[in-house]
Amino acid sequence: MFKTTRKIASIAILTGLSALSIQSTFAQDTTFAKEHPRRAEVIAREKHEKAMTAKEVKNGSLTQAQGKQLNKEDTAIRKEERADAAADGGHITKGEQRHLNRQENAVNAQRKADIQSNKAGVATGN
């Protein structure tokens, strides 16, 4: 009976250790994926763009509705980035990075156009 209890305890300990090993490996993979240079650049840019939008709404250059729309577009770009990375083991390709940057460029251009139209007193429909 003592041997059976020892075997069960040994199996439980080994199972627990292997689960911890798998979990720490997964955590490392997730960290690596987010720190991959192309992906990190896209994520940092998206955060910067959202911060700029918040700043422009706060100082009155953009309306709340315009800021909300721009943030919605930035969030959609981030979701696309996550989907691209998930499809390729946590990485994004150079082509995907270019595509995401073009989308961010368009959002940035829209932000600038909204600010200009607000200065001129013209509504852009957002």
Image: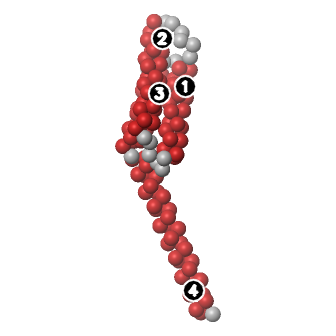
Q: Earlier in the sequence, mark 3 or mark 4?
A: 4
Q: CA distance from mark 3 to mark 4?
A: 58 Å
Residue 81 locus on image (x, y percent): 49, 38
Q: CA distance from mark 2 to mark 3?
A: 23 Å
Q: Give the foreground label among 1 and 3.
A: 3
Local secondary structure at mark 4:
helix
In the drawing, what numbered circle is on residue 103?
3
Query: In this rendering, is residue 45 above or below 118?
Result: below
Amino acid under label 1?
Lys
Residue at image position (49%, 6%) is 121
Q: Earlier in the sequence, mark 1 or mark 2?
A: 1
Which residue is under mark 1? 68
Q: CA distance from mark 1 to mark 2?
A: 15 Å
In depth, the one of 35 and 47 nearer the eye is 35
Which residue is under mark 4? 7
- Binning the other alpha carbons within 10 Å of mark 4 as few (below 14), some (14 to 19) or many (20 upward) gives few
Amino acid under label 3?
Gln
Q: Give the foreground label among 4 and 1.
A: 4
Q: Earlier in the sequence, mark 2 or mark 3?
A: 3
